[in-house]
Image (tube, rainbow, N blue to C red):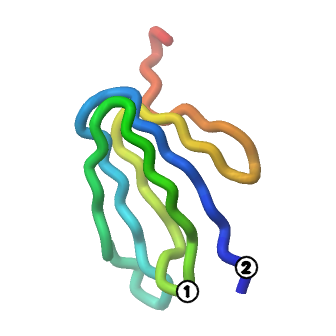
Amino acid sequence: MSNEYFVIKAQDNGVQVIGLTRGQDTRFHHAEKLDKGEVMIAEFTEHTSAVKVRGRATIWTKFGKIEAGETDSE
């Protein structure tokens, strides 16, 4: 299994990063809270199939850069 890494940088205080499990029942298994400017480097593993980001953050993956938490006025 080739693990994929991704980077999340918080643009505001209180950005939540939530890991979800693999398997028949998807469940939350880990959560982190980032403050503005903090960076988290993470990976998808045999236990983590998805990640939910709540709040304004920049996310980099092998697919490019994604801005999370944008408002309609931006």
State the image quarter where residue 4 is shown: bottom right
- Left or right of 35? Residue 19 is right
- Image position of 29 with respect to 38: above or below: below
The residue under label 1 is 46
Q: Quadrant of residue 13?
A: top left
Badge count: 2
Q: Nearer the viewer, residue 61 or 70?
A: 61
Residue, x 51% and y 67% (percent of image)? 50
| Residue located at (47% from left, 90% from top) | 24
Q: Residue at x 55, y 49 (%)?
A: 7
Mark 2 and 1 residues: CB-CB less than 8 Å, in contact? no
Instruction: Look at mark 2 in the image and give the residue it sits on.
Output: 2
Question: Where is residue 65 drawn, in percent x and y?
Answer: 66, 37
What is the three-letter code of the residue carrying label 1? Glu
The residue under the point 66% across, 75% down is 3
- Quarter of image, res 57: top left
Q: In the rendered structure, which amino acid carries the disc numbered 2? A: Ser
**SS category of the residue bearing label 2:** loop
- Residue 26, x across and y down, in percent: 41, 79
Residue 49, given in percent of the width and then of the height, sits at: 53, 74
Q: Is residue 67 above or below residue 22?
A: above
x and y percentages locating residue 74 in the rendered image: 50, 12
Observer-nearest residue: 56 or 37? 37
Q: Residues within 10 Å of mark 2 (few under 14, many from 20)?
A: few
Quadrant of the rendering where the N terminus is positioned: bottom right
Disc 1 element:
loop
